[in-house]
Image: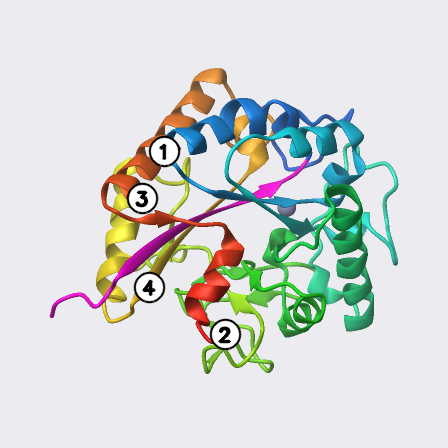
Amino acid sequence: MASKTERVVVTISIDTECDHDVNWARANPLTFDSINEGLPNRLQPVYNEVGAIPTYLLTVEVLEDEECVQTLRDLQGSFEYGTHLHAAFIEPEKKYYDYAGVACPEFQCNYPEDIEFQKLENLSNLFTEKLGYRPTSFRAGRYGASVCSIRSLEKLGYCVDTSVTPRMKWFEQSGDVDFRAAPMQPYTPSDDSIVRAVEPGSRSILEAPVTVQPRFLRRTPRWFRPWFADLDAMKAVAHYHLKKFSDQPVVNLNMMFHSMEIIEKASPYPQTAADVDVFLSSMRDVLAWCRDEGFEFAGLSELYKLYNPAG
Ligand SMILES: [Zn+2]
């Protein structure tokens, strides 16, 4: 059957945070090389070269740091800024005032809905205060989002959430999140279940899942993600989506990773300058391939219009 796909849209959603250590604790002392060196000197030049449009999802500690905010304001090129919540770092019920050395694996959706809403509202207000406009795209820390998170984001004017990782379940002491049954392409999420799609455009928020390919007899899928997959593997994920969703007019490829991954030893992933070069060249190569295939690049919030033409 001939493909009905008219547009393939590539989004790059990046959790943009302070440097961490190899065990995912925040650096001690706290450092921000991933912002001040990573965005202007390592990531954005690659996107400018290939014409890609990343979406940097900003955490509390980045928005609280004046040097980081200046870097964000000075960044040159096409990109979107959104937000990313690690719930222990903002009021109400803020747990840490000094983030250095802290590893906090909790899910925002395990807080009562009104507390989670206020945390999201405070993060959004912090973003607006620092950058001068409202954020419209979001990902939960550790993917810990539920129907309540979506409802709160919708009330706060967000149009795209990208917390869902299809075929995966994440564990935490006070409650798990289970995305194993989630759709693999953008959908309007039900108010009863974050993994159930309802009629497109029936809500003012779109869920754009992280792009993965299920693997036969493997518990974890393959990601469309540098370091987790090499160039050929990422192309294979793209081809899988193009074939599986060839009946859809728009197909989305949503790459994800963390800003810390392009600073050596600031995450569990690249540990040397040579590792960082491998990461960046595989990211550039797959994005250049996408461009050469005629795929388009867009910020996350653009997806909302593409999937909800009436809205
Ligand atoms: Zn995070």
Earlier residue among tags 1 and 3: 1
Contact (Cβ within 8 Å) of mark 2 with mark 3:
no
Earlier residue among tags 1 and 2: 1
Ligand 1 neighbours mark 1 (CB distance < 8 Å): no
- The alpha-carbon separation of the residues under discs 1 and 3 comes to 17 Å
Labels 2, 4: front one: 4
Ligand 1 neighbours mark 4 (CB distance < 8 Å): no
Q: Nearer the viewer, residue 115 or 169?
A: 115
Residue at point 51%, 54% (across, down): 300
Which region is colored magenta?
1-17
Dividing the picture into quarters, in which one does residue 268 lie? top right
Quick one: SS at disc 4? strand
Labels 2, 3: front one: 2
Q: Is residue 65 magenta?
A: no
The amino acid type, in three-letter code, at marker 1 is Val
Q: Which residue is mark 2?
A: 188
Quick one: SS at disc 1? helix
Residue at point 33%, 64% (across, down): 250
Earlier residue among tags 4 and 1: 1
On the image, the x and y values in percent for residue 42 come to 51, 24
- The alpha-carbon separation of the residues under discs 2 and 4 comes to 14 Å
Q: Which residue is mark 3?
A: 234
Dividing the picture into quarters, in which one does residue 102 lie? top right
Whether residue 215 is visible: no
Quick one: SS at disc 3? helix
The amino acid type, in three-letter code, at marker 3 is Met
Labels 1, 3: front one: 1
Q: Nearer the viewer, residue 299 or 309?
A: 309
Q: Which residue is mark 1?
A: 50
Residue 250 is marked as 4
